[in-house]
Image (cartoon, helix red, strand yellow):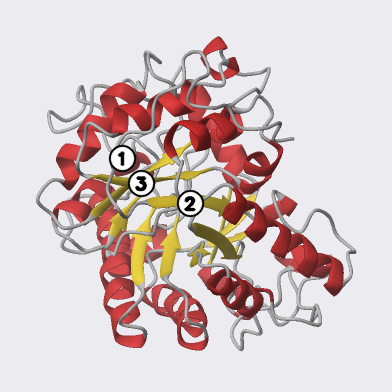
Amino acid sequence: MGRLSRRAFAVAAVATLSGFATAGDAGAVPDRPRAAREMRGMWLATVSHRDWPSRMGLTAARQRAELLAHLDTAVRLRLNTVIFQVRPSADALWPSPYEPWSQYLTGVQGKDPGWDPLGTAVKEAHARGLELHAWFNPYRIADHADPAKLVASHPARRHPDWVVPYGGKLYYNPGLPQVRAFVQTAMLDAVRRYKIDAVHWDDFFYPYPVAGQSFDDDAAYAAHGSGFSNRAAWRRHNIDRLVLEMAAAVKKVRPAARFGISPFGVWRNAATDPLGSATRAGAQTYDDLHADTRKWVREHWIDYICPQLYWNIGFAAADYARLLPWWAKVAQGTGVQLYVGEGLYKAGDPAQSAAWQDPAELSRHLTLARDYAQVRGHAFFSAKEVGVDRVGAMARVVADHYGQPAQPPR
């Protein structure tokens, strides 16, 4: 998944479920009273077969069975929300009239898989008492740089002027008004068709920087950038407009649905901006992705924010214990709900630090979060690790914090 390579970049930039533990186990945290409603979510990634489907070539029946198994795992672990990636790369996991069927279903972009994964996910999630948040990636086209590999009917082939090759991948150009309009139309088709509970975006806006390369939007800037002090300000304006327009459209098309974004966890370092966090991250969303995530919360443009705080407590460059209160302060008084993205994928990974070999690390995150009223829940990346649970970190979270089921926040 592109998110995987981005996670590897982020780390560099900043320097079988085996049974639940009981509250009586050594070091366990007693389940204290908590809010009646909280997000208990997991991401279900489809790009590059990250979580689902497990591989190419599966029958429709096998794909469906695997999808339902993930939903059943969420129920078993007392989660209440699944964030399902339905537009991983300018494609669709539903019968879209605007974009091709995703290649991750059949191995062939544009080929009908013989069933409706998003429609099934919404129906089956709701039947299990789960919320279904439809996760879209606005601008990513492909994890390769060859437009000829796209299906002939792909919008990127019909509109090559919309496309920017960068870092060995293809992206839509956020600086073009026609691109911004199209990607919203493509996403809103799913919002109209299905009773999704939320529209969800992650941290892909302008792409993460690639050393020695520049994102070629010269022509778009020349055509549309007048009146801005510099290109970075214009780029942030482009993303701001995308967020504002999509928020309004979601409310118009499906008033009950929420609109949430899960950005990279560092808006700006304090050394860059006194309003920033006490971090030393090499990536900053405001400067590198041109995404002013703090403003979206302070101005209440979105319904929820779920920053990816995928670092351990005590990590020098980006300490979870420092970022959590920073985001709580950002959300305070805004009405925007704050959920925390948790890096379960790191737990038990031998390539990670010693902190991530401790099954209690994530449980400590949730314990710490209880001290901040703005935190309304957590989401875990991602479904594969939720199910496998290499070192029992998820089991520890459930034992320490999810003793009883909980409804999602209103």
State the separation of the CA atoms marked 1 and 3: 28 Å
Camera sees residue 223: yes
- Give the foreground label among 1 and 3: 3
Q: Do we see residue 44 in this rendering?
A: no
User: Is residue 312 or residue 244 the one in the foreground?
Assistant: 312
User: Which residue is the site of mark 2?
Assistant: 41
Q: Nearer the viewer, residue 322 or 401?
A: 401
Looking at the image, how many numbered discs can be counted on the residues? Answer: 3
Pointers 2 and 3 in contact (C-beta within 8 Å): yes
Q: Residue at x 30, y 22 (%)?
A: 321
Amino acid type at image mark 3: Gly
- Report the amino acid beneath label 1: Asp
Q: Verify CB contact (< 8 Å) between mark 1 and mark 3.
A: no
CA separation in Å, label 2 and label 1: 29 Å
Instruction: Describe the element under mark 3 as helix, strand or loop.
Output: strand
- Residue 139 vs 316, above or below: the answer is below
N-terminal of the pair, mark 2 or mark 1, is 2
Q: Position of residue 252 (x, y in %)?
A: 29, 86
Tell me which residue sits at (37%, 17%) in the image. 317
Q: Position of residue 127 (x, y in %)?
A: 57, 74
N-term mark: 2 or 3:
2
Q: Judge whether 250 appears above or below 378 on screen.
A: below
Q: Is residue 118 above or below residue 286?
A: below
| Front-most of residues 235 and 220 | 235
Which element type, helix, strand or loop, lies under badge 1?
helix
**x, y percent for residue 212:** 52, 33
* Residue bearing mark 1: 287
Dot 1 or dot 3, earlier in sequence: 1
Mark 3 lies on residue: 377
The foreground one among 206 and 316 is: 316
**Identity of the residue furthest to the front in this view:** 24
